[in-house]
């Protein structure tokens, strides 16, 4: 067989190896999270870890299938795939099942399928296809609006499914927009909006208005006064004041009570320790109790006695922290960091703009999931219920991240063919 006809020819093995190591770590920790004396075999298909083994094997099959495709297929069918994912998101609103409060699942017997996970694949392909078109400039309003629409369509549909956590992950695409030329000042404004939102929940709104007024006056009087600068400062002040005055209303009416509680639990370590703050407090206890090297495999007491809910899915990192300690956490974080760095390095080397944008979209999604999931287990982010890529239990999540990663690996082999 000629090397060119081998599907593994020019595959980036560092990415593949890190992927394989992460899914194996995930499988072992899912086993530890739900282990019991009645079900000792890691191959028991009646348990989460047995089912995860099936998801792992089928994800490897998906990876092989993707490597069989010509990379031009993804470019040509980016928009059709995106539109099909939008169709599924609409269909699940009418024909889907409610699971854990989210109307976002298709059920076929014991098999569950969540379109919102795969919609990230379609959105990534569509954005890469659109932003790689000739004569596009993200500094132009028309281009910004169309790019935002591609991102917002699945986001709004997922919000209608009451799956707020999955919807929030689409904010990761803003990182791609800035890489491709969107002005950095918009990122600063976005960060300021988030900061004001949080401070409004912690500080009396009239005190905060006074602070913002003082900053506005200082920015005018301690710089050269021009008409444009005064108008810009006044405009920003009005927007900030409007945000401060509307946060409490928006917080009380747009977020559900359990979502409000999760935000307060993140902001206050002592908030409702037996209710909304329970998961977070138990998560911190589990991770902290692991010490430097952990309690040992299958010896985690927080894990064995189910103190942390959802420990094989959203809180899988707790199992790593308790049983493998700081050392295990460091290894997992190093693997994710290595994966992200490798994806960014390869993205910068792409000769195709489409492949570069796709690579940065992949890195942004993985980074967002990684930071928020680990952040919520240690109290640095609200508990919004998103999986840790490749580690958390679940077929839809593992399949979607596998497809995202191996499409990029396939696109990268095309880059090497052009050298």
Image: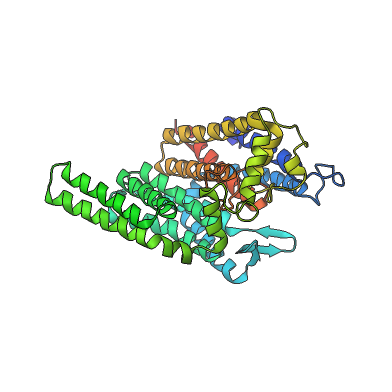
Camera-nearest residue between 303 and 360: 303
Q: Position of residue 282 (x, y in %)?
A: 66, 45
Residue 290 visible: yes
**In the visual, does 144 lie left or right of 9?**
left
Residue 21 vertical placement versus 180 (above, below): above
**Quarter holding the N terminus?**
top right
Quarter of the rendering containing residue 369: top right
Residue 186 vertical placement versus 290 (above, below): below
Camera-nearest residue between 82 and 393: 393
Q: Position of residue 365 (x, y in %)?
A: 50, 46
Residue 77 visible: no
Q: For the view shown, which residue lies furthest in the bottom direction?
A: 94
> Residue at the location (46% across, 48% down)?
172
Q: Position of residue 177 (x, y in %)?
A: 38, 47
Q: Position of residue 85 (x, y in %)?
A: 53, 60
> Residue at the location (24% across, 49% down)?
216
Q: For the view shown, which residue lies furthest in the right direction?
A: 38
**In the visual, does 419 lie left or right of 216?**
right
**Quarter holding the C terminus?**
top left
């Amino acid at each position: 067989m000629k090397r060119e006809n081998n599907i593994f020819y020019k595959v980036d093995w560092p990415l593949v190896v890190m992927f394989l190591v992460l899914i194996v770590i995930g499988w072992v920790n899912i086993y530890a999270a739900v282990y019991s004396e009645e079900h000792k075999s890691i191959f028991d298909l009646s348990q989460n870890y047995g089912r995860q083994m099936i998801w792992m094997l089928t994800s490897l099959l998906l990876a092989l299938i993707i490597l069989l495709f010509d990379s031009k297929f993804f470019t040509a069918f980016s928009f059709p795939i995106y539109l099909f994912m939008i169709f599924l998101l609409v269909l699940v609103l009418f024909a889907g099942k409610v699971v854990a409060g989210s109307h976002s699942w298709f059920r076929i017997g014991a098999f569950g399928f969540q379109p919102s996970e795969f919609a990230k694949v379609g959105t990534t392909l569509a954005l890469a296809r659109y932003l790689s078109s000739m004569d596009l400039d993200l500094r132009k309003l028309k281009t910004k609006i169309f790019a935002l629409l591609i991102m917002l369509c699945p986001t709004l549909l997922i919000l209608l499914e009451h799956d707020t956590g999955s919807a929030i992950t689409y904010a990761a695409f803003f990182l791609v927009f800035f890489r491709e030329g969107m002005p950095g000042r918009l990122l600063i404004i976005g960060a300021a909006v988030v900061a004001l939102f949080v401070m409004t929940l912690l500080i009396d709104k009239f005190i905060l208005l006074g602070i913002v007024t003082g900053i506005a006056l200082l920015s005018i009087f301690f710089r050269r006064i021009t008409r444009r600068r005064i108008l810009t400062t006044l405009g920003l002040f009005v927007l900030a004041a409007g945000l401060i005055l509307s946060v409490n209303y928006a917080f009380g009416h747009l977020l559900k009570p359990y979502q409000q509680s999760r935000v307060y639990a993140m902001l206050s370590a002592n908030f409702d320790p037996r209710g909304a703050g329970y998961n977070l407090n138990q998560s911190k206890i589990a991770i902290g109790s692991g010490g430097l090297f952990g309690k040992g495999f299958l010896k985690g007491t927080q894990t064995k006695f189910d103190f942390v809910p959802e420990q094989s899915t959203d809180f899988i990192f707790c199992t790593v922290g308790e049983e493998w300690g700081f050392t295990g956490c460091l290894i997992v974080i190093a693997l994710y960091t290595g994966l992200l760095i490798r994806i960014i390095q390869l993205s910068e080397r792409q000769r195709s703009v489409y492949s570069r944008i796709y690579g940065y979209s992949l890195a942004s999604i993985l980074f967002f999931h990684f930071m928020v999931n680990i952040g919520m287990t240690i109290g640095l982010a609200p508990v919004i219920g998103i999986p840790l890529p490749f580690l958390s239990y679940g077929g839809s999540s593992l399949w979607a991240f596998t497809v995202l990663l191996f499409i990029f690996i396939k696109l990268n082999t095309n880059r090497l063919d052009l050298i």
